[in-house]
């Protein structure tokens, strides 16, 4: 007997339902450790997307190797994983479509992957995973097996073309919510196709209002097969990023728990990069020459009203966040410092490379007394706790729309090692440029970074805005997005 539970209970009971039916035949194989790739920020995952739990349940099913289930039923009912790739069609066509040949045959073809069987070789690197039949029935998404592989199919006839397929009953393609889709997967061992998986995830969300997780798949032979969940592979991850940025923007602590300056754990580093026939995440040649890449530092007590200028750019994670190439805060200025004309980016135009504290300037009043009439010629504030406090005090009186922070230049062409958190656009006209950068990054690295709208004059909680429909650059690698207006790279900034 199947017992149908409410949505909340069902979410946590799904693995139990999948295993609560007695199977006969070969004993269950020992469960392998679940392969779940989840970043440190997984605690902030969207509660409606229990991707780690889904990956665990699917890996567990893959490891089971009975000869039959439920006395004499097919082994598909309690073991293995049903995979399906979309039949031929235009790239933007719904992934749950059914081929005309399948309609004629009366069943939809599935690949069946199990630990003790030869590795499957789907026709595409992206597809979806079907929920096991008992759980699907309990979720109100029932389906039946029509044909399958001998001897695991028991009394079912073999499928025709190909003979190793498993056939399930046809579903209503106009009602995707009724289809028992458990996850979307992309084959990370075969080059990966995260962009297409994101497109599938959005298709399902647009039609049903529900998020289903994207899983990385390693479709190798035997125990090499695994399904893993990474929060950063999900379109919904952008909401997590926007929320995290709002929290850091509102966090005005002056020191971090380890007594380092507050900029290491709070606030938001933003850089206008421009876009075009260059890699927007690389420092410009002049920045490398002076070992200084210009950013602005946005925080509630910094009174930032705009970025350096229009054009899209990059948002970096907090400096203490784990990353392959940590960034170094070298110096800061309360206003645009014209750093392109400064020796070493932090010195003054007279050739003096000393920072403010080395010159005896340790308060905002002293800095204003020394440079108030020409702040662009002022000394740079050192990266210490005390000088960070001076920067904050100066931002209460210096009438400038943005500050400037100098970050040590990093080597070019290391995008996967950088603590990139998001791409952003400061005005609607710049959205296309941000999408252009997003697409370039996805094509270069295979990884998703969200595009956000950033309006520094908005009320708290609405400064960093994530919209699913803005992520066109990540979901479309079929053609390079058209540059909406002349892209450019600031030769100095």
Image (cartoon, rainbow, N blue to C red):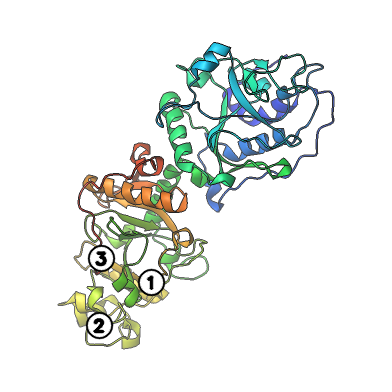
Mark 2–mark 3 Cα distance, whole angstroms, equals 23 Å
Which comes sooner in the sequence, label 2 or label 1?
2
Q: Given this view, does label 2 or label 1 mark the residue nearer the observer?
A: 1
**According to the image, label 3 marks what residue?**
396
Packing grade of label 1 (10 A; few <14, some 14-19, many >=20) is many
Mark 2–mark 1 Cα distance, whole angstroms, equals 19 Å
The answer to which quarter of the image holds residue 492 is bottom left
**According to the image, label 1 marks what residue?**
409
**According to the image, label 2 marks what residue?**
348
Location of residue 143 in the rendering, given as x and y in whole percent from the top left corner? 61, 16
Location of residue 296 in the rendering, given as x and y in whole percent from the top left corner? 31, 63
Packing grade of label 3 (10 A; few <14, some 14-19, many >=20) is some
> From the image, which quarter does the C terminus lie in?
bottom left
Q: Is residue 379 above or below residue 100?
A: below
Tell me, for residue 41, which label it has, or none: none
The answer to which quarter of the image holds residue 470 is top left
Q: Nearer the viewer, residue 436 or 14?
A: 436
Helix, strand or loop status at disc 1: loop
Location of residue 130 in the rendering, given as x and y in whole percent from the top left corner? 60, 27
Mark 1–mark 3 Cα distance, whole angstroms, equals 29 Å
């Amino acid at each position: 007997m199947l017992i149908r539970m409410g949505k909340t209970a069902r979410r946590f009971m799904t693995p139990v339902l999948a295993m609560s039916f007695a199977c006969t035949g070969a004993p269950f194989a020992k469960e392998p450790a679940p392969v779940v790739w989840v970043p440190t920020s997984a605690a902030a995952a969207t509660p409606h997307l229990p991707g780690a739990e889904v990956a665990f349940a699917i890996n567990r099913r893959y490891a089971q190797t009975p000869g039959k289930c439920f006395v004499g039923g097919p082994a598909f009912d309690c073991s293995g994983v049903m995979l399906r790739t979309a039949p031929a069609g235009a790239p933007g066509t719904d992934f749950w479509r059914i081929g005309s040949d399948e309609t004629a045959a009366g069943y939809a073809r599935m690949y069946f992957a199990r630990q003790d069987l030869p590795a499957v070789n789907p026709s595409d690197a992206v597809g979806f995973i079907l929920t096991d039949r008992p759980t699907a029935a309990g979720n109100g998404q029932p389906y039946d097996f029509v044909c399958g592989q001998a001897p695991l199919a028991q009394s079912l006839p073999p499928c025709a073309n190909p003979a190793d397929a498993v056939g399930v009953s046809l579903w209503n393609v106009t009602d995707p919510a009724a289809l028992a889709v458990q996850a979307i997967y992309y084959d990370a061992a075969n080059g990966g196709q995260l962009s297409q998986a994101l497109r599938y995830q959005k298709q399902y969300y647009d039609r049903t209002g529900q998020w289903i997780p994207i899983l990385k798949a390693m479709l190798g032979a035997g125990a090499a097969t695994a399904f893993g969940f990474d929060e950063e592979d999900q379109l919904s991850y952008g909401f997590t990023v926007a929320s995290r940025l709002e929290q850091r923007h509102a966090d005005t602590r002056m020191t971090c728990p380890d007594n380092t300056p507050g900029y290491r754990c709070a606030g938001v580093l933003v850089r206008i990069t421009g876009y075009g026939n260059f890699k927007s995440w690389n420092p410009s040649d002049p920045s490398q020459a002076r070992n200084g890449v210009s950013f602005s530092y946005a925080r509630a007590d910094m009174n930032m009203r705009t970025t350096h200028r229009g054009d899209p750019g990059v948002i970096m994670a907090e400096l203490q966040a784990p990353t392959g190439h940590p960034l170094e805060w070298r110096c800061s200025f309360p206003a645009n410092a014209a750093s392109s004309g400064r020796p070493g980016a932090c010195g003054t135009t007279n050739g003096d490379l000393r920072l403010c504290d080395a010159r005896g300037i340790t308060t905002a009043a002293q800095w204003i007394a020394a440079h108030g009439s020409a702040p662009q010629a002022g000394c740079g504030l050192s990266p210490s706790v005390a000088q960070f406090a001076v920067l904050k005090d100066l931002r209460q009186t210096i009438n400038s729309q943005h500050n400037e922070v100098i970050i040590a230049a990093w080597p070019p062409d290391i995008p996967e090692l950088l603590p990139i958190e998001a791409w952003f656009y400061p005005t609607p006209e710049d959205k296309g440029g941000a999408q252009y950068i997003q697409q370039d990054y996805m094509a270069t690295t295979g990884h998703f970074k969200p595009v956000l709208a950033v309006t520094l004059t908005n009320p708290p909680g609405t400064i960093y805005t994530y919209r699913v429909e803005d992520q066109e650059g990540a979901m479309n690698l079929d053609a390079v997005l058209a540059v909406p207006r002349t892209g450019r790279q600031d030769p100095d900034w």
